Image (cartoon, rainbow, N blue to C red):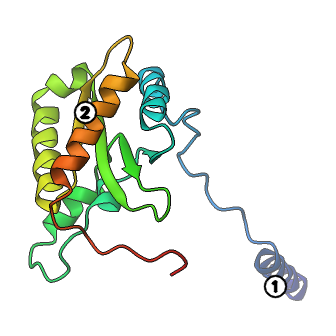
C-alpha cells in the first residue's frame, strides 16, 4: 500500500511539473477607452489644428518626454517623472522629435494636489526646454486659435537647446 501511495505522489508531482497550475489572476481589467469624452473632443480639434504638420501622441509618461540626468545623485527626481503623464505630445513626423506638450485642464486642476503637480510639470518641462501649452476644457475649441498658440509656443522655445535626437533608421 505504501508503495502505491508513493508511486501516486510521484505521479502527481510529475503531472504538476508537466502541467503547472495557471498563474493567479491579476487584478486588472480593460479601461475601454484611452481618452475621456472631453479629451477625445479636444484631440480631434488638436489634430485639425496641427493639420498633419505634427504627430499627436496621447497620454505619454512625462519620463517619455523629458529625461533624467543620469549622474544626478537624487533619484527621487526620476521617480517624480515616471509616475506622471501628460495629455498630449506633439512630435515631428519625420523623426518623432518632441516639439511641445499640450495639457487639457479640467476642474480637477483646481485641487491643491493637482496644482502642485501642475507646477512641478511646468517647471520640469521648462527646465528641459520643452514648450507647454495649457488649454482649459471647453464645450468647443477653435482649431485656428489652438494652432496659433501651439506655433507661438514652439517658436518661443525654438532657440532653446534641444535634446539629441536619433537619426531616422538608427
Question: Is residue 19 toward the left or the right of residue 40 in the image?
Answer: right
Label 1 residue SS: helix
> Which x, y percent locates residue 157?
17, 53
Compared to 130, does 86 lie above or below?
Answer: above
> Which x, y percent locates residue 31?
54, 35
User: Residue drawn 45% across and 26% down?
Assistant: 45
Q: Residue 10, labelled with which disc?
A: 1
Compared to 141, does 94 lie above or below?
Answer: below
The quadrant holding residue 81 is: bottom left
Compared to 148, does 68 lie above or below?
Answer: below
Q: From the viewer's side, name the closer residue of 109 and 163.
A: 163
Question: Is residue 14 toward the left or the right of residue 25 in the image?
Answer: right
User: Residue drawn 42% across and 31% down?
Assistant: 49
Residues at marks 1 and 2, CA–CA distance in whole angstroms: 72 Å
Label 2 residue SS: helix
Question: Is residue 143 toward the left or the right of residue 65 in the image?
Answer: right
Q: Residues within 10 Å of mark 2 (few under 14, many from 20)?
A: some
Question: What residue did someone put label 2 on?
Answer: 149
Q: Earlier in the sequence, mark 1 or mark 2?
A: 1
Question: Is residue 141 toward the left or the right of residue 5 in the image?
Answer: left
The quadrant holding residue 86 is: top left
User: Residue drawn 15% across and 60% down?
Assistant: 159
Q: Residue furthest top?
A: 139
> Which x, y percent locates residue 71?
14, 83
Q: Residues within 10 Å of mark 1 (few under 14, many from 20)?
A: few
Q: From the viewer's side, name the closer residue of 146 and 140.
A: 146
User: Residue drawn 81% across and 72% down?
Assistant: 19
Of the residues tagged 1 and 2, which is closer to the observer?
2
Quarter of the figure with the N terminus: bottom right
> Which x, y percent locates residue 170?
50, 81
The quadrant holding residue 140 is: top left
Amino acid at each position: 500500500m505504501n508503495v502505491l501511495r508513493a508511486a501516486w505522489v510521484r505521479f502527481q508531482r510529475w503531472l504538476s511539473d508537466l502541467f503547472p497550475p495557471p498563474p493567479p489572476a491579476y487584478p486588472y481589467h480593460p479601461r475601454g477607452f484611452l481618452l475621456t469624452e472631453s479629451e477625445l473632443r479636444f484631440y480631434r480639434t488638436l489634430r485639425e489644428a496641427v493639420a498633419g504638420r505634427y504627430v499627436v501622441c496621447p497620454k505619454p509618461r512625462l519620463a517619455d518626454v523629458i529625461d533624467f540626468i543620469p549622474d544626478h545623485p537624487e533619484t527621487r527626481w526620476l521617480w517624480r517623472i515616471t509616475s506622471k503623464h501628460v495629455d498630449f505630445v506633439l512630435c515631428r513626423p519625420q523623426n518623432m522629435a518632441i516639439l511641445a506638450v499640450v495639457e487639457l485642464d479640467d476642474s480637477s486642476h483646481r485641487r491643491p494636489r493637482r496644482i502642485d503637480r501642475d507646477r512641478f510639470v511646468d517647471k520640469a518641462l521648462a527646465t528641459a526646454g520643452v514648450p507647454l501649452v495649457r488649454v482649459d476644457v471647453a464645450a468647443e475649441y477653435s482649431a485656428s486659435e489652438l494652432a496659433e498658440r501651439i506655433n507661438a509656443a514652439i517658436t518661443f522655445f525654438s532657440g532653446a537647446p534641444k535634446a539629441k535626437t536619433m537619426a531616422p533608421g538608427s
